[in-house]
Image: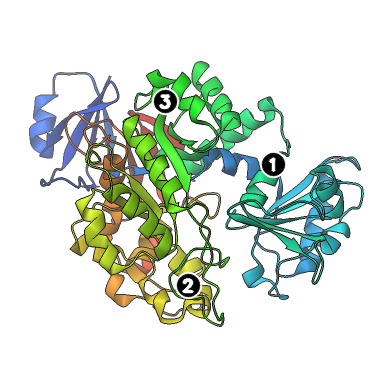
């Protein structure tokens, strides 16, 4: 049956103002004036949906996150609110007790941030040994780039005095010794997490369904799995096989370790199979600025020489880029520091066949203004984690000084004609799209300091970075991202018009309904 939406404000993001729209078979089939559309369907069986003065706009499209990782965090201890080591210890002990863990099972927690702990330092194995000496214990930093293991976990994973640092990562050591202190960062930590199996496949599928509901509650109808290895692919492919996915989910495959996923599933590259597709490859080039592992051209404030570090040499990056181009697939690349950004830009500048593949620079926190015109020439899309301004802006001021003013330089990107997107890197933070819009428009830190006033953008520009521009990033601009005849009926109904309210109120907007292909997948309270 046709559906008619009317009697509200409709934000189309197209060059037209409309008062009503019709949906049929999951697509928008008609838009226009209310009176004209009512007259057209007066003799037809139509479900009339009165918006009652509320606002309808395109649903949000997640341009970078890790939906499977969010699912994993739902089954472990949550440490985001912990303010010191003692609270971490108590939270982990309570999690063990509440979940009836025996004395040999892994106890895992997520979301601590040493920047906001009373101690202002990373915990060590001695701290985690207070949780248990028989259980392997691991806690993951909120950034996902580092973490800490207890003595038992180090023993199980074979990390000891003889273990060398991996390229692009470090093992923390007790001072003046080679003995690991439990702290691992970047590739060393990622390698360790891949060796821990916490949930069964059946448990993970249930957790992914919960994660989908979280995304939908924030108005998202298209989500990403931004670092797909064999485990993530097998889970999502199994769910697609059984038609279990409510959202469209797009995978980006680990280019270094899992290229066989792309090679063996060519039919899924850029083509949905029961709401799931492979978007291309994912590459990491550095770490995080709040963890001081992002690779930057001038030392961190208070450091004499330390500038973070790269994961690869330039020649290796060039080889990865060449591989993606030769296979005609998109490459999304994690770059926080300006030197990591420089590696990626140089690698693409060496190629002559880039225009069709829309390479994406993920995060682009410290990309320099002089690099943006070069990105424009190679059709590179910066996807900004602009909520860093709020969540870690005060830390960036401490670590970067004046350079913090230009983190996430979205306005400069717009002025250089770049297509840009914005994201939350979930589970680093929740995929709260209206909060991200608030961050991009207001650029305030948690302490209320405004940083980078020259980089503030308008509400409409922020909305575009989460809708129509994200659709373009995924090569889906003909099907998604705006309210237009022929596009999918993917939209949200909200309680306020974001284009008309005070900008301080943006993050208080409520999602009343999230609609995917014409069907309600989330209904608010």
Q: Residue at x 84, y 40 (%)?
A: 105
C-beta proximity under 8 Å, tags 1 and 2? no
Q: Say what secondary structure mark 2 lies in.
A: helix
**C-alpha separation, residue under disc 1 versus residue under disc 3:** 24 Å
Q: Residue at x 71, y 34 (%)?
A: 199
Can you identify the residue that label 2 sits on?
393
Q: Say what secondary structure mark 1 lies in.
A: loop
**Foreground residue among 312 and 512:** 312
Q: Residue at x 39, y 68 (%)?
A: 407
Q: Residues within 10 Å of mark 2 (few under 14, many from 20)?
A: many
**Foreground residue among 1 and 158:** 158
Along the horizontal axis of the image, is 115 left or right of 439? right
The quadrant the N terminus occupies is top left
Which dot, 2 or 3, sits closer to the camera?
2
Mark identifier at residue 275: 3
**C-alpha separation, residue under disc 2 versus residue under disc 3:** 36 Å
What is the total number of numbered labels drawn onto the structure image?
Answer: 3
Disc with the residue nearer the chain's start (1 vs 3): 1
C-beta proximity under 8 Å, tags 2 and 3? no
Along the horizontal axis of the image, is 149 left or right of 126? left
Position of residue 426 measured from the top left corner of the image (x, y, whole percent):
51, 49
Disc with the residue nearer the chain's start (2 vs 3): 3
């Amino acid at each position: 049956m046709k559906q008619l939406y009317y009697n509200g404000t409709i934000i189309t993001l197209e060059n037209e103002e409309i008062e009503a729209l019709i949906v049929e078979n999951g697509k928008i089939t008609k838009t226009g004036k209310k009176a004209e559309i009512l007259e057209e369907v007066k003799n037809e069986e139509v479900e009339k949906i009165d918006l009652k003065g509320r606002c309808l706009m395109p649903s949000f499209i997640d341009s970078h996150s890790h939906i499977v990782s969010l699912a994993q965090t739902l089954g472990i201890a949550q440490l985001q609110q912990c303010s010191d080591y003692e609270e971490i210890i108590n939270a982990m002990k309570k999690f063990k007790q509440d979940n009836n863990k025996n004395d040999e099972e892994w106890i895992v927690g997520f979301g601590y941030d040493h920047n906001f702990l009373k101690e202002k330092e990373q915990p060590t194995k001695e701290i985690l040994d207070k949780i248990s000496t028989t259980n392997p214990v691991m806690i993951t930093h909120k950034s996902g780039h580092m973490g800490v293991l207890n003595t038992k976990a180090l023993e199980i994973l074979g990390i000891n005095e003889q273990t060398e640092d991996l390229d692009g990562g470090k093992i923390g050591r007790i001072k003046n010794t080679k003995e690991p202190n439990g702290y691992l960062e970047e590739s060393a930590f990622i390698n360790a997490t891949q060796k821990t199996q916490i949930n069964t496949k059946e448990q993970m599928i249930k957790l992914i369904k919960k994660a989908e509901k979280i995304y939908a509650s924030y108005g998202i109808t298209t989500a990403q799995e931004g670092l797909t290895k064999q485990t993530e692919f097998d889970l999502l492919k199994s769910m697609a096989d059984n038609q279990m996915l409510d959202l469209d989910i797009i995978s980006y495959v680990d280019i270094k370790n899992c290229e066989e996923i792309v090679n063996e599933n060519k039919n899924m590259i850029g083509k949905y199979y029961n709401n799931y597709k492979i978007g291309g490859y994912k590459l990491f080039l550095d770490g995080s600025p709040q963890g001081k592992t992002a690779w930057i051209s001038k030392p961190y404030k208070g450091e004499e020489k330390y500038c973070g570090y790269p994961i690869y040499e330039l020649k290796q990056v060039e080889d990865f880029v060449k591989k993606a181009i030769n296979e005609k697939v998109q490459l999304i690349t994690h770059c926080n520091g300006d030197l990591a950004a420089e590696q990626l830009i140089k690698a693409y500048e060496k190629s002559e066949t880039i225009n069709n593949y829309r390479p994406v620079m993920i995060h682009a926190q410290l990309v320099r203004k002089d690099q943006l015109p070069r990105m424009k020439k190679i059709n590179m899309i910066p996807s900004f984690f602009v909520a860093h301004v709020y969540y870690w802006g005060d830390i960036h001021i401490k670590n970067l000084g004046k350079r913090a003013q230009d983190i996430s330089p979205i306005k400069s990107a717009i002025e250089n004609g770049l297509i840009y997107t914005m994201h939350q890197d979930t589970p680093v933070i929740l995929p709260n799209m209206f909060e991200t819009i608030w961050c991009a428009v207001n650029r305030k830190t948690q302490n209320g300091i405004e940083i980078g006033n020259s980089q503030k953008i308008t509400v409409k520009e922020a909305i575009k970075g989460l809708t129509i521009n994200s659709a373009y990033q995924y090569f889906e601009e003909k099907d998604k991202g705006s309210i237009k005849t022929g596009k999918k009926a993917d939209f949200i109904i909200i309680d306020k018009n974001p284009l008309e309210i005070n900008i301080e109120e943006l993050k208080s907007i409520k999602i009343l309904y999230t609609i995917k292909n014409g069907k309600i997948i989330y209904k608010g309270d």
